[in-house]
Image: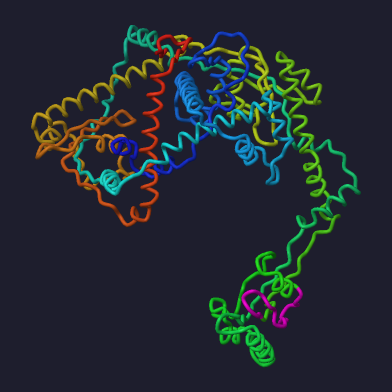
Amino acid sequence: MLTTIREKAQGAFAWAILLMICIPFALWGIQNYLDTGKEAPVASVGDKDFYQRDVNQAYEQYSQNLRGLGIDEATLKAQALDKLIKDEVLLQYVHAQGLVTSDAVARDYIRSLDYFQVDGKFDEKRYKSLLSSQRISSPEFVNRIKNALTMEQFQRSITDSSFATQYDLESFFKIQNQKRDVEYVTVAMPKLTEQPSEQEITAYYQQHQDQYKTPEQVSIAYVELTLDEVAKKVEVTDDKLKAYYEEQKDQYGTPERRKISHILFAVNDKTDDKTALEKARKAKKELETKDFAKLAEEVSDDKLTAKKGGDLGLLTPGVMEKPFEEAAMALKAGEVSEPVKTSFGYHLIKVTELVPGETKPFEAIKGEVAKAYQKSKAENLFYEAGEKLAEKSYENPDNLDSVAKELNLAVKQSPLFTKDKGEGIAGEAKVREAAFSEEVLQGNNSTPIEISPERLVVLRVLEHKPASVRDLASVKQEVADTLLSEKARQQAVDKAQKIKARLQAGESLPAVAAENKLEIRKLTGLSRNDTSVPEPLSDAVFKAAKPVGDKPTVLVAALPAGEQVVASLFKVTPGVMTEEDKKRMDLARKNIARAFGQTEFDALLGTLEEDTDITVHSQPGAAKSE
């Protein structure tokens, strides 16, 4: 396990990996059980069948967290299907064990989700709008949440029960903070001038046609529902705006600024109530001739504020006890109160700064009030319109005219765009993902796409251009350049391997470098987080075996531009725990333990898979069955 952590924890990413382990497990598969009719299943787990729609939805969820990592769609879809299968195996196991989550716990969890919150409270209309758009009943949704919570609870019972010993921590830091000494030479790619032959160009083009494809493209028709546009249709009158202004007056001004100081005469085991009150009255009389701040410093029992002349800063409503707050609010600037009793004793209170609050007049901000009023009234209308958007686009899957007419929306069009890049509405990743989904490419409307909580889109494909291979004539020079580059890269590789072989045979690096006119560079005390060294070289150095005796470890690393680095690793110094590491000891212990726990859980899940009847129908080569 420590080896795995070491291999993944390269340089500055080490602590990021540990922190990532802390991220709460995401609930999976909430939308994976829709009715699929009589189509053939894609995969089966025991008696449970999964259809293409399930896989598509699983892929949409899974790929959201992995965009931009350069993973191809086919790989992501295979991983999403594997995740779907694993979760079903786990779900069947927890059910077989009699593990359940109560309806009450599931409903409390749903009510806590940010997605359903409006102004910090659960919004029933928003909740129903989502269920309507997904065509899910509330009991069905609650049941899915129950399943997901039960699976997560079981997973946590394993991952959270693991622990890391002091030995584990020391071993981790020995690896993480390890230093390595290395010498290396860089073999550059030669500059080739001889152009490849026509036969070579043709052969390479025919063998690598995927490299010369124009990407798949689509253009879409779409309707867009936004809260701002709905708000513009809300009727506005002066009477309604003035009423709204009065309700929200606090939002259109600056609050009063009231800074206060106090002198405390505490009531405690040594001083009774009567004595403290007498002290307060005496001090109040002394203030006729003494400065408040100076007297506070001399006699206040609140020693912390006494050093600052009794200064308590700005008065924040609700923080102080009610009698104290009421007395402070009643004072004018510079005025000192009579003794005020609280649970701490008696206080003399002074307002040292007072800036009255100010409310902007209605006429000055009428336009601002109108926008806020329209938006607040439009929220319910927006959610209702969202329900209609989902309903009509589903009832009429082959056109957008019906939904556009129902909601008085314009059907807009986009230019062609690819899976990775688009302009306008296609600049949104969610839109591109939906546009290239199998369901939409088959001619159906998409489900409503939530671009933001205040913006929904439904789309359909207007034009689809499959990927196509460009003809050889248009890419001939491109192919020739690639061939030259690959030949030069291969020559650099061959030269580097020959140098490596000579060093492994016992020849010295200075001698070999001099013969090949290469400059030797030396790195002493190289650490994993040294960003001055090319990452491929650092990775290779820290993955290399330790040198044995006086014999260095020789390795080759390829740099992104094609150069090859031949390195000789001759010393490894074990890492030591730094003072900064010691400060993060609890975090390291927790996350290494969580990593151990995740390994245990993965092993258990693998065993459960082996014991479960699993078949992947659409990919016979990947089928697993027992």
Quadrant showing the C terminus: top left
Q: Position of residue 252 (x, y in %)?
A: 77, 56
Magenta segment main secondary structure: loop
Q: Position of residue 69 (x, y in %)?
A: 45, 30
Q: Position of residue 624 (x, y in %)?
A: 41, 14
Give the magenta part as a residue range: 330-347
Q: Position of residue 91 (x, y in %)?
A: 50, 26
Is residue 346 magenta-colored? yes
* Residue found farthest to the front: 98
Front residue of 76 and 85: 85
Within the image, what quadrant is residue 184 found in? top left
Position of 54 relative to 69 (above/below): above
Within the image, what quadrant is residue 261 found in? bottom right
Q: Is residue 373 left or right of residue 36?
A: right
Front residue of 191 and 99: 99
Q: Residue at x 77, y 18 (%)?
A: 401
Within the image, what quadrant is residue 267 found in? bottom right
Is residue 65 magenta-colored? no
Position of 71 relative to 39 (above/below): below
